[in-house]
Image (spheres, helix red, strand yellow):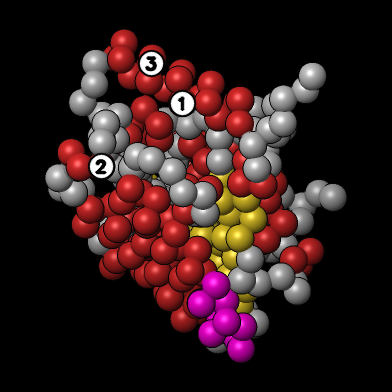
Amino acid sequence: MVNELTGKVAVVTGGASGLGEGLVRRFAAEGAKVVIGDVDRDGGKALAAELGGDASFVESDVADFEQVGRLVSTAVERYGGLHVMVNNAGISGTMHRRFMDDDLADFHKVMAINVGAVMAGTRDAARHMSEHGGGSIINITSIGGIQAGAGVMTYRASKAAVIQFTKSAAIELAHYEIRVNAIAPGNIRTSIVRKSAAGEDLEKLAEFEEKIRAQMRNDRPLKREGTAEDVAEAALYFATDRSRYVTGTVLPVDGGTVAGKAIPRK
């Protein structure tokens, strides 16, 4: 199918790079007009310029909830409406060797971006959608919010909160024909693993990341590497009428990781 989002308007937070960029590109390719929100001014402007008049960049720090609301109002004012809201922006927090060494200094920042901004984006999008025939809200969580594990405890807690919030919002907003779903990426190669180990030197960073990636590959049932395009494909499904009877769900895009560890072949 082609041009599945023709006539639709979408907002993607954290849309200048990584998973967000993949979402923006796929939505634009399917005919949507897209508002890109991000703190990365250069990356966001370059992406919008590349995509042309059907994409706009708005510099925004989603930790400031008023700036999240401005993304919604920009979409409505510039393109005449809002049909799809993707709350994608997120940060990992700092990786510590032991939780007992974690000073929790980044707790409020991680929670503000990973949870508070998702709630604000859902609320502000719903305010418009509730009066204009409904729409689709897609929250990006993580398999770290589903599957317990060591490390980045604040990140894991924040992503688990997104899942519970998504389900709760789906129940309340269903009255307005607003669907709220979540995507839980896993083992997708982006910069978030390296950012979580900030403070280490580059050589240690590379070694650390490769160890994490190797463990992911060993545990993952599907051996192909996941990509931002895989996440964008899932988001496209939630954004279109193909998912018109789907709400309150969490879709892992993780090569089967949360289903269970791979069974070694004899």
Secondary structure of the residue carrying numbered label 1:
helix
Observer-nearest residue: 257 or 86? Answer: 257
Name the residue carrying label 3: 206
Q: Residue at x 38, y 20 (%)?
A: 208
Res 128 visible? yes
Q: Residue at x 58, y 54 (%)?
A: 183
Res 85 visible? no
**Residue 235 point in image, percent of width and height:** 64, 53
Specify whether residue 191 is painted magenta.
Answer: no
Secondary structure of the residue carrying numbered label 3:
helix
**Residue 103 point in image, percent of width and height:** 15, 45
Query: Looking at the picture, does residue 205 appear above or below residue 232?
Result: above
The C terminus lies in quadrant: top right
Observer-nearest residue: 194 or 37? Answer: 194
Residue ranking furthest to the front: 266
Q: In the rendering, which numbered label is found on residue 99?
A: 2
Give the magenta range. 167-176
Of labels 2 and 1, the one closer to you = 2
Q: State how far apart marks 1 and 3 are (Cα).
A: 10 Å
Q: Residue at x 64, y 27 (%)?
A: 225
What's the residue type where badge 3 is placed? Ala
Q: Earlier in the sequence, mark 2 or mark 1?
A: 2
Name the residue carrying label 1: 212
The crowd level at tag 1 (other Cα within 10 Å; few <14, some 14-19, many 20+) is few
Q: Earlier in the sequence, mark 1 or mark 3?
A: 3
**Residue 229 point in image, percent of width and height:** 65, 38
The crowd level at tag 2 (other Cα within 10 Å; few <14, some 14-19, many 20+) is some
Q: In the rendering, which numbered label is found on residue 122?
A: none
